[in-house]
C-alpha cells in the first residue's frame, strides 16, 4: 500500500498586484495552500497601459488557460502600420500588411505644412497580432475575479519585517504594521519595486538591507491617458492609431491606443533624463510626484521637440503624475532566494519599462516556478524542506535572463534619447533599427515550453539526489 501524500507547505505571498494574483492562480491549480498579504484596503494598480509581448502570452498558457482567452478578448491589439509605415515596409521588401510593434520617429523633425508625419523606421511585431496592451487596472480586476480574494487575501496588512527561523526547522514569521504576526512555511515576495522582502533577503545573504533597495535610474516619466478625440485632433487618426515612439535628445515619448471600459484612449508616456540624477527626498516613499501639463511641455520644448509632440502634450490633463523610474541595475541581487524566502517579478528584477517587457518576464517567472512546484508534487516531494530546492532551482534558471532585462532596458532608453555615441554617427538609423530588433527578439522569442521542460528536469534531478 502506498503511503498517503504529505501535506503541502503553506506559502505567504507578499503583495496583491498582478504578479501575486497570477501566481496565486497557478498555486491554486496545484493545490498549494497560500495566503496573500496586501497593505492596501483593496486591490489597487497604479499606471495605465500594460504591454504584453508574445512571450507573455505564451507563458499564460502554462499558468492558466483561462487567462489566454480573457487576454485575447480584452487586450487592445495595435498592429496595422500607418500609411507612411507601410511604405517603409514595402521599401524594405516586406509585406505592407505586416503587423508592427512600434514606429520610430524623429521627435525634433518639423514636417512641412500639409506633410504627413513619417517614421524613420518600423519595428515589426514578434507575433501576428501587433503590439498588445491591457489597462492595468482592468487586468487586475480580471485576476481579482478569478482569485478567491475573500479567502486568499488579507487586506490592510503591511509587512514591516520577515524573520527566518534560526535553523532549518520552524516557520517563517511575518511581522505586520498593525502589531500582528503571521506564519508560513515559505515566503514569496511579490511586493514590487519597493519590496520589503528584497531587503530582508539581502540581509539574510549578508549584504545588508540597503543593498535590497531600488535605485533611481536617472529618468522620470509623465504618464496619462488622453481621450481619443483629443489625440486624433492633435496628430491625426493614422498616427494616434499606431504605437509610436518619438526620439530626441535626452527625451522620448511613447504613445499607443488602449481600451478601458468601452472607451478608447491614447496611452501617453513622456520620458525625461533627469539632469540632477536625484529624485526628490519625498519621492522614494511613493515614487510618484504631482506634476502639471506645463511641466511636461517645458521639458520637451527646451529639448527642441516638434510641434507634433508638443500638440500631444497640450491635450493632456492640466494635472498628471510624474513617476521616478527605479530599478535594481546598480544593485543587482546575488540570489533571488535565501532559505525559505524568495522574490519574484519586480521584487526580484525591478526594471525600467523601455523594452515593454517587464510584465512578460514576470509571467515567464511564474510559468517556471509553477513547473518546479508541479514536478516536486508529482514526485510527492514538495515538503517544507524541499522549498529551498524549489527556490534555488528558480534562481538558477531565471536570474541571468531577468537581470539582462534590467540592464538592457536602461540602455534602450539611452538609445531612444540619442545618448549612445556610436549611434549618433551619420546614417546610423539602420544600425539602431537592427539593435532594437535584436534585443526585442531576445525578449519575445523566449521558448516558454522549453523553459518549463528544463525546470521539471532540473527539479527532478535535484530531488533524485536526496534519495
Image (cartoon, rainbow, N blue to C red):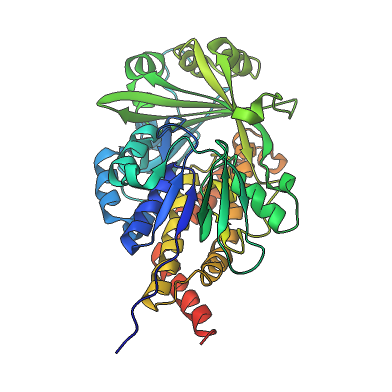
- Residue 391 position, x and y percent, is 54, 64
The residue closer to the viewer here, 121 or 87, is 121
Image vertical order of residue 151 relative to residue 264, above or below: below
Visible residue check, residue 357? no
- Residue 150 position, x and y percent, is 33, 42
Position of 330 compared to 404: left or right? right
Which of the image's four quarters has the N terminus?
A: bottom left
Q: Residue furthest front?
A: 180
- Residue 115 position, x and y percent, is 42, 18
Visible residue check, residue 118? yes
- Residue 239 position, x and y percent, is 38, 25
To which quarter of the image does residue 227 belong?
top left
Q: How many labels does the image show?
A: 0
Image vertical order of residue 282 relative to residue 18, above or below: above
To which quarter of the image does residue 424 belong?
top right
The residue closer to the viewer here, 5 or 355, is 5
Q: Which residue lies furthest to the bottom in this view?
A: 1
Residue drawn at point x = 43 percent, y = 67 percent: 373
The residue closer to the viewer here, 234 or 389, is 389
Image vertical order of residue 353 relative to residue 259, above or below: below
The residue closer to the viewer here, 271 or 117, is 271
Amino acid at each position: 500500500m502506498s503511503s498517503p501524500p504529505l501535506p503541502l507547505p503553506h506559502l505567504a505571498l507578499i503583495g496583491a498586484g498582478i504578479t501575486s494574483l497570477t501566481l496565486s492562480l497557478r498555486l491554486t491549480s496545484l493545490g498549494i495552500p497560500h495566503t496573500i498579504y496586501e497593505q492596501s484596503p483593496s486591490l489597487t494598480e497604479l499606471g495605465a497601459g500594460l504591454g504584453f509581448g508574445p512571450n507573455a502570452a505564451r507563458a499564460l498558457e502554462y499558468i492558466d488557460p483561462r487567462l489566454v482567452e480573457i487576454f485575447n478578448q480584452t487586450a487592445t491589439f495595435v498592429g496595422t502600420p500607418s500609411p507612411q509605415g507601410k511604405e517603409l515596409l514595402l521599401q524594405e521588401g516586406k509585406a505592407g500588411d505586416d503587423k508592427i510593434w512600434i514606429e520610430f520617429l524623429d521627435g525634433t523633425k518639423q514636417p512641412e505644412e500639409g506633410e504627413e508625419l513619417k517614421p524613420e523606421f518600423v519595428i515589426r511585431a514578434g507575433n501576428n497580432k501587433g503590439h498588445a496592451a491591457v489597462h492595468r487596472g482592468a487586468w487586475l480586476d480580471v485576476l481579482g475575479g478569478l482569485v478567491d480574494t475573500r479567502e486568499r487575501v488579507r487586506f490592510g496588512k503591511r509587512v514591516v519585517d520577515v524573520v527566518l527561523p534560526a535553523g532549518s526547522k520552524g516557520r517563517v514569521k511575518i511581522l505586520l504594521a498593525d502589531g500582528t504576526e503571521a506564519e508560513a512555511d515559505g515566503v514569496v515576495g511579490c511586493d514590487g519595486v519597493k519590496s520589503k522582502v528584497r531587503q530582508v533577503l539581502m540581509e539574510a545573504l549578508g549584504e545588508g538591507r540597503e543593498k535590497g533597495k531600488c535605485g533611481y535610474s536617472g529618468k522620470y516619466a509623465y504618464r496619462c491617458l488622453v481621450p481619443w478625440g483629443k489625440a486624433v485632433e492633435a496628430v491625426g487618426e493614422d498616427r494616434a492609431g499606431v504605437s509610436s515612439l518619438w526620439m530626441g535628445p535626452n527625451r522620448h515619448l511613447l504613445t499607443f491606443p488602449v481600451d478601458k471600459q468601452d472607451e478608447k484612449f491614447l496611452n501617453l508616456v513622456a520620458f525625461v533624463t533627469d539632469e540632477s540624477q536625484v529624485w526628490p527626498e519625498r519621492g522614494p516613499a511613493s515614487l510618484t510626484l504631482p506634476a502639471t501639463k506645463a511641466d511636461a511641455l517645458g521639458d520637451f520644448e527646451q529639448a527642441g521637440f516638434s510641434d507634433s509632440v508638443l500638440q500631444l502634450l497640450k491635450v493632456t490633463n492640466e494635472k498628471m503624475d510624474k513617476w521616478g523610474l527605479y530599478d535594481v541595475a546598480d544593485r543587482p541581487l546575488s540570489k533571488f532566494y535565501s532559505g525559505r524566502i524568495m522574490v519574484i517579478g519586480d521584487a526580484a528584477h525591478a526594471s525600467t519599462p523601455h523594452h515593454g517587457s517587464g510584465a512578460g518576464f514576470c509571467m515567464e517567472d511564474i510559468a517556471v516556478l509553477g513547473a518546479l512546484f508541479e514536478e516536486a508534487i508529482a514526485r510527492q516531494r514538495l515538503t517544507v524542506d524541499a522549498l529551498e530546492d524549489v527556490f534555488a532551482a528558480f534562481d538558477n534558471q531565471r536570474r541571468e535572463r531577468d537581470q539582462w532585462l534590467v540592464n538592457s532596458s536602461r540602455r534602450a532608453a539611452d538609445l531612444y534619447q540619442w545618448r549612445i555615441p556610436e549611434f549618433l554617427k551619420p546614417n546610423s538609423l539602420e544600425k539602431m533599427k537592427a539593435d532594437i530588433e535584436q534585443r526585442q527578439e531576445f525578449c519575445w522569442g523566449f521558448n516558454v515550453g522549453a523553459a518549463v521542460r528544463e525546470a521539471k528536469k532540473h527539479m527532478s534531478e535535484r530531488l533524485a539526489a536526496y534519495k
